[in-house]
């Protein structure tokens, strides 16, 4: 060791819990294609509400898995395993197809359409010609690009940033909306907002809820932080979605 550095040896124990998670992940991936064929994946739409009119102006697509038709499985039970490899791309596209199918149905019935956001994983962004591929899917349903919002987490462009941002630019140029999810969590990179053509910034609920925790001595600071962030984003001409609004007081 030199200076203040010390030689360290880390020992990780392979527990029964880890073993069970590894087996569960392998089981899910082995069954994925069968589940797709059986149409076990369902997409639910969570509405986005305008704070002034309190009317719906869009929605977010949320995937659930009716695993072997035994009941709905929340994403936390399967998404992390698929994110380890390209399996997550199949999930992304299941959601996109179902959303486009629903928009097409509404369009044919003469309903007014609103943008729906679908998740775009980092693994998906790493694919060659991904913008062209996603555009081809949307166009196959005859859906105007303005009704599809591609949503990614703030960490999605951290690796190979120049390439990732070029894809977002391409999607933006094709008329799609681009949003940054979970803004304000993890290691936020504020400069990314100015480097990519984001249309919407989604502020994580962890920045809203502390304001309403009565036992939190820093409630006022939490309020100042959220207000400052909202004002900053609005001054950039971007739209904002605040997650976790569940009460009138929070609204």
Image (cartoon, rainbow, N blue to C red):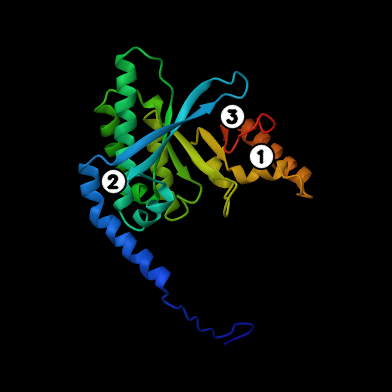
Crowd around label 3: few <14 · some 14–19 · many ≥20 (10 Å)? few
Crowd around label 2: few <14 · some 14–19 · many ≥20 (10 Å)? some
77 w.r.t. 6: above or below: above
Q: Earlier in the sequence, mark 2 or mark 1?
A: 2
SS at mark 2? Answer: helix
Q: Earlier in the sequence, mark 1 or mark 3?
A: 1
Q: Position of residue 221 (x, y in %)?
A: 76, 45
Q: Which residue is mark 3?
A: 237
Point out the frontmost of discs 2 and 3: 2
Q: Position of residue 117 (x, y in %)?
A: 43, 33
Q: Residue furthest bottom?
A: 1
Q: Which residue is mark 1?
A: 229
Between the C-alphas of marks 2 and 1, the distance is: 34 Å
Tell which of 25 and 174 is nearer to you. 25
Q: Earlier in the sequence, mark 2 or mark 3?
A: 2
* Residue 45 appears left or right of 56: left
64 w.r.t. 158: above or below: above
Where's the N terminus, which quadrant?
bottom right
What's the residue at 54%, 20% (across, down)? 55
Point out the frontmost of discs 2 and 1: 2
What's the residue at 36%, 30% (across, down)? 174
Residue 25's disc number: none
SS at mark 3? Answer: loop
Where's the C terminus, which quadrant?
top right
Q: Position of residue 138 (x, y in %)?
A: 30, 30
Between the C-alphas of marks 1 and 3, the distance is: 13 Å
Residue 90's disc number: 2
């Amino acid at each position: 060791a030199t200076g203040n550095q010390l030689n360290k040896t880390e020992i990780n124990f392979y527990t029964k819990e880890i073993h069970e998670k590894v087996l569960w992940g392998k089981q899910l991936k082995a069954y994925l294609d069968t589940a797709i064929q059986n149409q076990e994946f369902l997409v639910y739409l969570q509405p986005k509400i305008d704070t002034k009119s309190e009317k719906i102006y869009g929605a977010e697509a949320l995937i659930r898995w009716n695993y072997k038709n035994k009941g709905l499985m929340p994403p936390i039970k399967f998404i992390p395993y698929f994110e380890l490899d390209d399996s997550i791309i199949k999930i992304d596209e299941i959601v996109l197809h179902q959303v486009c199918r629903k928009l097409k149905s509404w369009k044919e019935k003469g309903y007014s359409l609103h943008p729906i956001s679908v998740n775009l994983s980092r693994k998906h962004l790493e694919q060659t010609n991904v913008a062209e591929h996603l555009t081809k899917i949307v166009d196959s349903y005859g859906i105007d690009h303005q009704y599809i919002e591609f949503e990614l987490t703030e960490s999605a462009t951290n690796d190979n940033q120049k390439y990732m941002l070029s894809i977002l630019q391409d999607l933006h140029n094709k008329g799609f909306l681009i949003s940054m999810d979970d803004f304000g969590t993890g290691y936020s990179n504020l400069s990314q907002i100015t480097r990519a053509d984001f249309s919407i910034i989604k502020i994580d609920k962890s920045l809203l809820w502390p304001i309403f925790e009565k036992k939190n001595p820093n409630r006022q600071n939490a309020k100042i932080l959220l207000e400052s962030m909202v004002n900053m984003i609005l001054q950039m001409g971007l739209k904002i979605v605040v997650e976790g609004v569940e009460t009138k007081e929070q609204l």
